Image: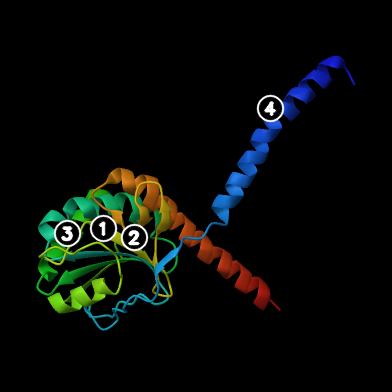
Amino acid sequence: MSKSFKKYFVLFILFIFPIVIYLFFASGKNNFALLPILTAGVDEIDHWGTLSGEPVQLKDRITVLGFWGSDLSDKKGDALNLNQKIYRRFYQFIDFQFVMVLKQGQQDQVELLKQELKSGVGTDLIKWRFVFGSDDQIARLFKSFKTPLLLNAKKSLPYVFIIDKERNLRGRDDDEDEGTLFGFNAQSVAEINNKMVDDIKVILAEYRRAWKKYNKNTAP
């Protein structure tokens, strides 16, 4: 073994190898992370009114859910942010959906908003779903989330939430800014990019691992 080779080998061990090991374990931590359950068993919505008349449910779906109430005039920016940064990236995953909760009477405004979303980015909106209820229905649903956040007088707020297939509210219990992060501010592109995208990736990876494990255990 030449002196030159020994020199570079020692340098590799001292400097490069630790970085490789760090990246390996950092990657492993990300791949096997779980998104904490913050509230178990939020209320189901399969009895609510919808645009198509077909029921929408949370059970067995991975859902991004928002409360828009009668506040659609101020939600165009939120919708565009979510459509561009989250929906377009993840909508092709099986069982993934967007659900927006609105007050009865907003159906025509929703149709107009859908047209704007289609013309803006040309994305298939098949997994954008809208449900309609009374003030009391919306308030009860939101109460079941058990967050410190508040709906405004229009039964709306700028945050969207991640609901898993068992109807559990998922979020962060160790967020560097909020401590406990129940939802994501759809008005903040930075929060969507820096936090929500990562958390959607985590929960989708969790279900992919569970699906692979199930198929492996049930294979003949």
- Spot the residue most to the right: 1
Circle 4 packing at 10 Å, graded few (<14), some (14-19), many (20+), is few
Q: Which residue is mark 1?
A: 159
Give the Cα distance between marks 2 and 4: 40 Å
> For the point 63% across and 46% down, which residue is it?
25
Cα separation, mark 1 vs mark 2, equals 9 Å
Image disc number at residue 182 = 2
Q: Which mark is first along the chain, 1 or 3?
A: 3
- Which residue has dot 4 on it? 15
Q: Would you place residue 172 above or below residue 1 in this image?
A: below
Amino acid on which disc 4 is placed:
Phe
Query: Is the residue marked by circle 1 packed among few (<14), some (14-19), or many (20+) residues within 10 Å?
Result: some
Structural distance between the alpha carbons of marks 1 and 4: 44 Å
The disc labelled 1 sits on which kind of residue? Answer: Tyr
Secondary structure under tag 2 reads loop
Q: Nearer the viewer, mark 1 or mark 2?
A: 2
Frontmost residue, 152 versus 100: 152
Crowding near pointer 2: few (<14 within 10 Å), some, many (20+)? many
Q: Which label's residue is closer to the chain start, 2 or 4? A: 4
Q: Where residue 165 appears, x then y in whole percent?
A: 43, 73
**Residue on which the image places disc 3:** 113
Residue 205 visible in the shown view: yes
Residue that appears at 32% across and 79% down = 44
Q: Secondary structure at mark 3?
A: helix
Badge 4 or badge 3: first in the primary sequence = 4
- Give the residue drawn at x 10%, y 57%: 73
Q: In terms of secondary structure, where does tag 4 sit?
A: helix
Q: Quadrant of the N terminus?
A: top right
Q: Quadrant of residue 131?
A: bottom left
Cα distance in 3D space between marks 4 and 3: 54 Å
